[in-house]
Amino acid sequence: MTTFARISFDPALPLWLLTALAVFAAALLALAYWRRSGGVTWRLGAIAAALLTLANPSLVQEQRNPVPDVALIVVDQSISQRIAGRAVQSETALEKLEQRLAGRPDLEVRVIRAGMGTASDRFLPEGTHLFGAIRAGLRDVPKQRLAGIIVISDGQVHDLPKVDVDATGGTDFGGPVHLLLTGQRGERDRRLVVVKAPSYGIVGETLNLSLAVEDSADDRTGSTVGSTANAGRARLSLRRDGGIADSRSIPVGKTRNFPFRLNHAGATVLELEIDAGPEELTEKNNRAVVIVNGVRERVRVLLVSGEPHAGERTWRNILKSDPSVDLVHFTILRPPHKQDGTPINELSLIAFPTRELFQDKLDEFDLIIFDRYRRRGVLPDIYLQNVAEYVRRGGAVLTAVGRDFATLPISLSRTPLGAILPSKPTGTIREAGFRPLPTDKGRRHPVTAMLEGIGEPGSPPTWGRWFRQIDVEDVKGDVLLHGAGQQPLLIMDRVGDGRVAQLLSDHAWLWTRGFEGGGPQAELLRRMAHWLMQEPDLEEEDLRARAVGSQLLIQRRSLNPLGKDIQITTPSGEVASIALTDNGRGMETGAMAVMEPGLYRLNDGAHRAIAAAGDINPLEYADMRASPTKFLPLLEQSGGGAFWLADGMPDVRRIKPGRINRGHNWLGLRASGDYTVSGVAQTPLLPALLVLILFLGLTMLAWHREGR
């Protein structure tokens, strides 16, 4: 606290009137002096005493408490600050600044660490953000109290305020902004740039991925020079969905297109990586990840009904209700043994285009359904052999069988198609009421586990009964439902690269009619069809994860409870173990906190998965070289400067407002000199009695002088 004294005036008359009286008195005295009247000097003293009294001077003494200025130190803790020893540089610079500014009563030092996200969002998807934290830190600081802002960073900041707006736009902080640059001059770095990548594509169609390799260096002044070292070639490794890497050589400094096809619906993860270049700053930006979502343009289904029956319309309605399905449906109404000599041109029936469907265009179908089909000479064995080969190449076949399947001479099991079917008929047909019941695997398989009304283990489903079932033997694959006598009712199996399923009853249509309450027939048949077409969401043995906010949600499907922990490798290479909880329906779930953006790799010994969290190609990876270029407009406007920490720590000086804020190897913090007044004492300088005596004395002396 200090005491400051000053003289204050509190005129008894308005200032203009007091001024007029002073001018009038001066005129009279000038006239008297011109006429050489006696006592002019004494009259001048008397009038001056009177006017001074009317001005009412007093001595004011203020008790002042200095208000310290605020110096804000911002430490950048973003991704690019974690390479090449920049974090150590930052902490060392911060420690020296705190030591140099400590103990100053006129300065308050505040330290903000920013650029690493918040507790709920640990990584910033749009690069490094510092100035939001700066504004929050200065919210309670008036502009005149800001001594200055010192930013310790590599210059790669992506929320810099624009300098072509007024103070309301956030560029005028009230003090100089200085930049202490981490890193080294002339850093060189090679990086992989994804020039153009599709976000989605149609399964089976060719897409293009545009890539470029840039190898650049900063010049000695710190400005960015593009492609100063773009020469030679680099080796690119491409890995699809965590599989085996495919390597190829690409030129540095040129954009190249890489065609590829999506093999399945859902997300396809492409991992790209190039070898390190000479004098590589970091290999973090030598990698990139592209996620392309595959969609099916249209699903083509061929439905072949062996004869008209009550359940035929059910199949057709279910398939036609899906707008993504192109259905080709043929019902055999006039088999060869019913030829009666009627000319073809007099028939209203369409001839079954067997050659076109089962030879020329067979591979264009995603699923083939044989509904109560039997050997009757319509499809020669060569075409059924084509169907079997179609499945082994990745196709799908569903057979919904009736009585004819149990009649061995005409059964499909006696054709080349029988080699891929998951069971063979015994010849027995059960015709008695029974309820389809899920097996232990059926309660865990994604096709049946979540069917409405399936019930809990130990309690029967709330489904209506069926009345016909075909007994089978030599069962292969997974039995999901069983019926009368615990015999298999729904079997699903893999053959080569394709899949097959058998529904050993033709009474599923009873559920559609609502018999005894019905059942989830539409959902069951739809799930069977999508599993056969290898829909990723219906894989029974699967491990996957997805990031939601700051959590990584993990799901593992299995027909058998595994009870194994999941090993998770983070983007930085750390390995964590997570235990999963089984829900009893084939799904095990777990979660872990996400601490950094990038790819998380999951492995339980049998399954592998990849999950992307946050911005998998962070904006900071575009250029990780230290440079003041982005800061220069702001530094120039605020009067601050940029200093390379590699050249040494600059000196810190307090300067008065209006002075230069920077110099050779020194930066300035403004000293505003603000204070608060805690007490005021006011003492009149002209007591009334003293003024009266002085006025009367001077007047009497004037009279006396004039009388002589």
Image (cartoon, rainbow, N blue to C red):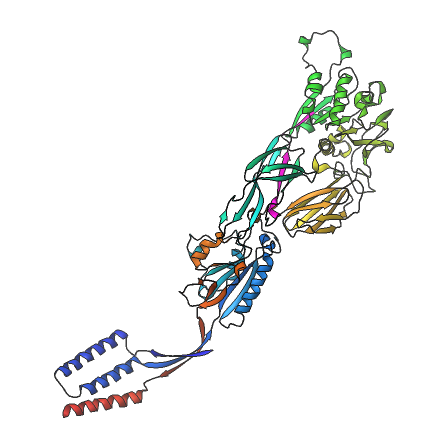
Query: Residue reaching furthest left?
Result: 35
Q: Quadrant of residue 86?
A: bottom right
Give 699 or 541, whichever is nearer the viewer.
Answer: 541
What is the chief secondary structure element of the magenta stretch? strand
Give 29 or 448, whichever is nearer the viewer.
Answer: 29
Give 176 or 521, whichever is nearer the viewer.
Answer: 176
Residue at the image position 80 percent from the left and 21 percent from the top: 416
The number of numbered badges drawn on the structure is 0
Rendered position, 192 above or below 23: above
Magenta segment: 283-301
- In the image, taking residue 26 as reference, residue 506 lies left or right, namely right
The image shows residue 677 at horizontal and vertical percentages of 44, 75
The image shows residue 442 at horizontal and vertical percentages of 79, 37
The image shows residue 39 at horizontal and vertical percentages of 17, 88
Residue 556 visible in the displayed image: yes
Residue 435 visible in the displayed image: no
Q: Is residue 537 magenta?
A: no
The image shows residue 431 at horizontal and vertical percentages of 85, 26
Rendered position, 481 above or below 646: above
The C terminus, quarter of image: bottom left
